[in-house]
Image: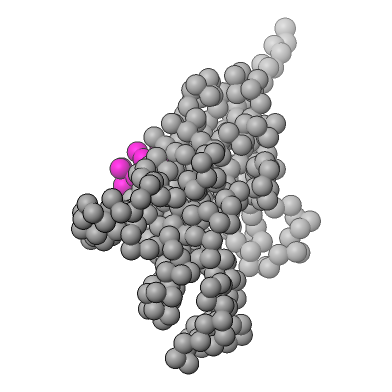
Amino acid sequence: MEVADPLPEVQERRLVIAVDYGTTYTGVALAVVAGNSARQDDIIAIDSWGPGMANHEKIPSVISYSKAIGPEWGASVDKKSVAMVHTKLQLEVSSPSEELDLILQALEGMHDLDSDRIRDAGPLPAYTWKGPEAIVEDYLTRMLESLLRVERGFSKQMRRHMPVDIVVTIPAGWSYRAKNSIFRALSQAGFNRKRFPKLREMLLVSEPEAAAAYTARYFKELDPEFDDEIDDEFDDEQFLRKDECFVLCDAGGGTVDTISYQVKQLRPTFEITPVTKAIGYKCGSVFIDIAFKSWLREFVGEDNYLKLDPAQARDKITSFDREGERMRELMAAFNILKRKFEKGHQDMKMDFLTLPEPLHNLNLHNKVEGGQIIIT
């Protein structure tokens, strides 16, 4: 008597939600997968965020409390609003010197606890008194509300009946306190069992590990018909060789993270293993912006600078980073120049940087002419 082959095991389908809350931009992707395998084509990057959000795959990691109707966030922040920026960096204070710096900033903003100056500041400001974790929670709350409203992949029926895993990318080397803060912010924002009844796990994965896995899988799964469209050194035969190692550098807005992997095997299953620990430092592109602001403050003088960015006025009662309308306009122009700058350039003479109103006609000691400056 012949024995029939056993029926193949039916693997349970599950919804995987990936959240990348960045210092400057945030992205979300989802995939419905069976078992532990998924192809790149299974991944859907969210690019529909609702009215006023410009509908890109990445949205700005900013939120504003300027309006009485509730916080504005992402790309929907009104140009006249004061925006809270770089909040992710404040979830992690990694050294005593950084803690001291935050204390000094707060004391400076509160005029060394001078009650008269705090009282004279008037009603509640256009920025918040909340801590970084609560600000991140508010941002993530609005992000999730937008996703549930416009994205079919988050249908109520799917959330009720399908197992869900949530994967969150974080900088390498983040402290337990920072990890706990982002975990609590996500949970309080709605990434929890109340919103996803069949939630199984919330996983925190270091950003360079996630980027390395994606990059390696991308080249592994690249169709041979497309090999001639990429450089030879990056095709799946040259780039991924058994037993060889590769280094991935994830240079983001807030942190720069690196990790090294070795390719253990390509077929029949794809396998890579780390050969170093993931490491990261606060040296991302946002620190170029911060240094530019510091330079500009000294270059045009305190009084002129505060005309550009009243949000940074000395009567502030918080140490949070924030940007007003004119400074956001200036930083957008600066970022265009920053991205065009190349090795070997001596200065940015290719384009002048024009200061916005009310400094658009400023002339200053042969340094600023007609509101235009050159960054050497």
User: With 17 as the anchor, is 202 left or right in this view?
Assistant: left
Q: Main secondary structure of the magenta part?
A: helix
The N terminus - image quarter: top right
Q: Position of residue 193 (x, y in %)?
A: 48, 22
Was residue 180 drawn as part of the magenta stretch in this picture? yes
Q: How many marks?
A: 0
Was residue 61 drawn as part of the magenta stretch in this picture? no
Residue 278 can be seen, yes or no: no
- Which quadrant holds residue 145? top right
- Of residue 246 and residue 4, the one placed in the foreground of this image is 246
Residue 194 can be seen, yes or no: yes
Name the residue at 36% across, 45% down. Answer: 129
Name the residue at 62% across, 31% down. Answer: 148
- Which quadrant holds residue 241? bottom right
Q: Position of residue 4 (x, y in %)?
A: 71, 13
User: With 164 as the anchor, is 158 left or right in this view?
Assistant: right
User: With 226 as the anchor, is 307 left or right in this view?
Assistant: left
- Of residue 204 and residue 63, the one placed in the foreground of this image is 63
Q: Position of residue 346 (x, y in %)?
A: 51, 88
- Of residue 173 and residue 284, the one placed in the foreground of this image is 284
Looking at the picture, the colour scheme in use is one colour
- Which quadrant holds residue 103? bottom left
User: With 2 as the anchor, is 154 left or right in this view?
Assistant: left
Name the residue at 52% across, 76% down. Answer: 359
Residue, far right: 225
Residue, far bottom: 366
Instruction: Read off the magenta span.
Output: 175-183
Q: Position of residue 179 (x, y in %)?
A: 36, 42
